[in-house]
Image (cartoon, rainbow, N blue to C red):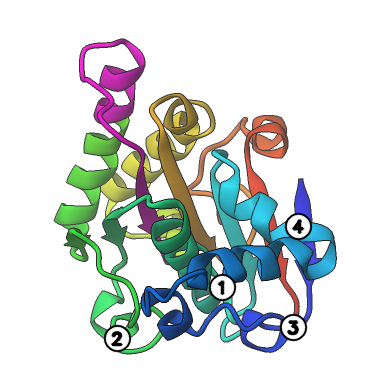
Amino acid sequence: YTIAYTLSLHDALPICFPVTIKKEKKGGKESVIKMIKNHEDGWLWKVIEFQKPVWLTGAAGSGKSTTASAIVFCREHLLGVPLEEIIDPHYGINKKEAWKWLEPKQVFMSDDQIIARFLGQVGRWKAKCQGIKEIQRSIQVLVDEFTNHSQNENKDIQKASSIRMSASLTDPRKAKEMITGVSHYLTNVGMGGASGTAEARKRGLITIQRKT
């Protein structure tokens, strides 16, 4: 389903204060979870818990990455699902801003890295779904600037982003991987150029439209 909202999470809910969660005081995490569940009928907690891929969309500067960061952070520190990868060509800037509280195990920034990682993810999902690769635990993957990939001059990255988007509509949930993505639009261009997936995106994704 699609959620539209106008406030940033900083304003709407004080969950973006990571120190509150990290202090490890008795009842600290439980109190934060309770607060999120009680906020606006608990829609945000449902987003955090759902296994379906979550996509944040909106105009530049609307707070998409900050919102994505809050969701990823809560999943890691409240659900215990570690952040395995960040795929972001602007990671050098975002690590000081939107991603400053996140601790990914791996980061991919260059075109070559992103192509290899997109195709590697698809292969990993299939291997898990087929039982070839053991699913040891749930993990998270964060993808930013997805709009740019379908418009990239590099044809290989265009193809890789399209393949990845198509596979992400079904495989990650079965492979126990929580995907959070950031894009400007919900169109085929914004979703990696994966044509013919509009209906599948409606059924297979949670989309949050950030309004300014």
Q: Which residue is mark 3?
A: 7
Q: Which residue is mark 2?
A: 93
Q: Which residue is mark 1?
A: 67
Q: Position of residue 54 (x, y in %)?
A: 57, 51
| 1 or 4: tag closer to the N-terminus | 4
Q: Classify 197 as above or below 48.
A: above
Residue at position x 44%, y 80% in the image = 18
Q: Classify 8 as above or below 37.
A: below
Tell whether position 124 is magenta.
yes
User: What amino acid is labelled 1 in the image?
Assistant: Thr
Tell me if label 2 and label 3 are in contact, CB under 8 Å.
no
Residue at position x 22%, y 20% in the image = 134
Graded by Cα atoms within 10 Å as few (under 14), some (14 to 19) or many (20 or more), the crowding at tag 2 reads: few
Q: Which residue is mark 4?
A: 43
Q: CA distance from mark 2 to mark 4?
A: 30 Å
User: What amino acid is labelled 3 in the image?
Assistant: Leu
| 3 or 1: tag closer to the N-terminus | 3
